[in-house]
Amino acid sequence: MGQSTQDLGALIRGARNARRLTQEQLGLTVGYSASAISRIESNKMRLDTDTIPLMARALDIPVEWLRGAAVPEVPTIATVATGCRPDEEDAVRRRELLTGALAAGATAIVGAGTAQALPAADLEDVLFRLPNAEPVPLANLMAQTAAARRTYTAARYSDLGRTLPGLLATAEATRDTASGRERQRASAILARAYVLAAELASKQHSDAAWVAADRALSAARASGMPVPVGESSRVLAITMRRSGRWSSAVHLLTSQAAELDTTDTRTAAVRTTLLLTAAYSAAAGGDRTTALTLLDEAEDDVERRPQAPGGLFTVDATRAQADVYRIGVNNTLGTPDDGVKVAAGLNIDHMPTAERRARAWTDTARMWHALGDSQQTFAALRRVEQEAPQETRRPSLRALTSDLLYRPARVEGLREFAVRTGALV
């Protein structure tokens, strides 16, 4: 008798118990917090698509079970799990992958020889227990926040983790002691700081993203400024989408986009980024028509309007960014071949930041992976590592790397890359 997708939480819980793993241990393996695993097992949160292979290997079950295929009843998992892959070599490699992923999670490594300064669990603690801080002049606070943003766009996430607690505390203290127009400006800067926290938490698959995004939007609305509100809405919608609430995410993004004044170049650029994010969110929900319609609308905006000037809330509304989203949308809709021509015409090297270039190479790697081209996939992963080494240790990329190891085609250098990035120890 098959098990419905509504019972996937029970399947994961049963397989985890069969492997004698705690929720915290399983979370470390796949890059989620213990509370996120609890929500997944209660069917209150969905697994990210890219995390499914890593979760399947951590639990020693076929990946198809986590994609909604028929599975045995949960009580039999303990007996069938050990027989899902009879090949002895695969069994050894599977144990190596599980051990390596657990070790990488437990030590929270984010770069070659570099320990993560602010793991997901610590980020959650920081948001509820900010350190004491004194207010500073707004010019100083803006400079600190701009520096933190540059750290993020350079993909130096461990450095950002060290910076965030003090920055958030200082921004809160400065906002609380300000009044009038100064308070509005301080609220806008505080929103930017919380956006950074939400983005970092999202990369770690941490529930802290919810808290940070909500606080960002509250501060942005208090500022009365449309650009902070738009960017904060975007990170909140991403958090919604990652929890399976893609329809709510699309509604929030499109509603916010409709409220923006498109005669101003900065707000018009924010509108474009909201539409791009909405397109990807619709694709995550399998709504192909809405996804492609929103994507086309965003691309029309890019063609009609120049890129917005820089600033604390710099947004990326370029043709290259729209092309990256088109590749990602097609990957998510299950039509990666539609992105091949787009990828061929995309000059990733000209994108403005290491974080953006790494994300573009990530979507390119996923495209080639879906098309079954292991060599091209690995070449793109190597480019991710060149641009932003810490990106390669994100749970989704470790999962993709692990999956490559099981492909029939042997790729030179892949095993060493997997060890280097924490997918295999």
Image (cartoon, grey):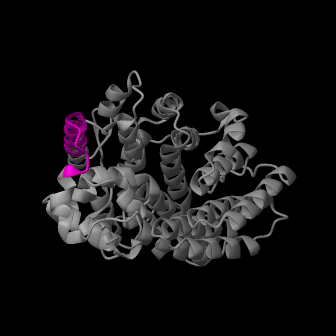
**Is 292 rendered above or below residue 220?**
above
Location of the N terminus (image quadrant): bottom left
Residue closest to the eye, 220 or 334: 334
Furthest toward the top, the residue is 412
- Looking at this view, name the residue that lies furthest to the front: 1
Q: Which sits in the foreground, 202 or 8? A: 8
Residue 87 drawn at (x, y percent): 23, 38
Say whether residue 269 is left or right of residue 335: right
Q: Is residue 128 visible?
A: no
Q: Main secondary structure of the magenta part?
A: helix
Queried whether the magenta region covers residue 97, the answer comes back as yes
**Residue at the (35%, 35%) spot, across then down:** 405
| Count of numbered labels shown in the rendering | 0
Location of residue 246 in the rendering, given as x and y in whole percent from the top left corner: 55, 70
Q: Nearer the viewer, residue 214 or 319?
A: 319
Residue 70, picture quadrant = bottom left
Is residue 411 at all visible to an observer of this figure? yes
Looking at the rendering, the stretch of residues picked out in magenta corresponds to 83-99
Residue at image position (26%, 52%) is 58
Q: Position of residue 28 (x, y in %)?
A: 25, 54
Look at the image and tell me in which quarter the C terminus lies: top left
Residue 120: x %, y % from top left: 32, 58
Q: Quadrant of residue 237?
A: bottom right
Q: Is residue 124 found left or right of 310 in the rendered image?
A: left
Q: Is residue 15 magenta?
A: no
Write the residue at 23% across / 70% down: 74
Position of residue 70 in the picture relative to residue 252 (left or right): left
Instruction: Please give the name of the residue rendered at 74% of the width and 58% of the height, measured from the top-left corner.
Output: 266
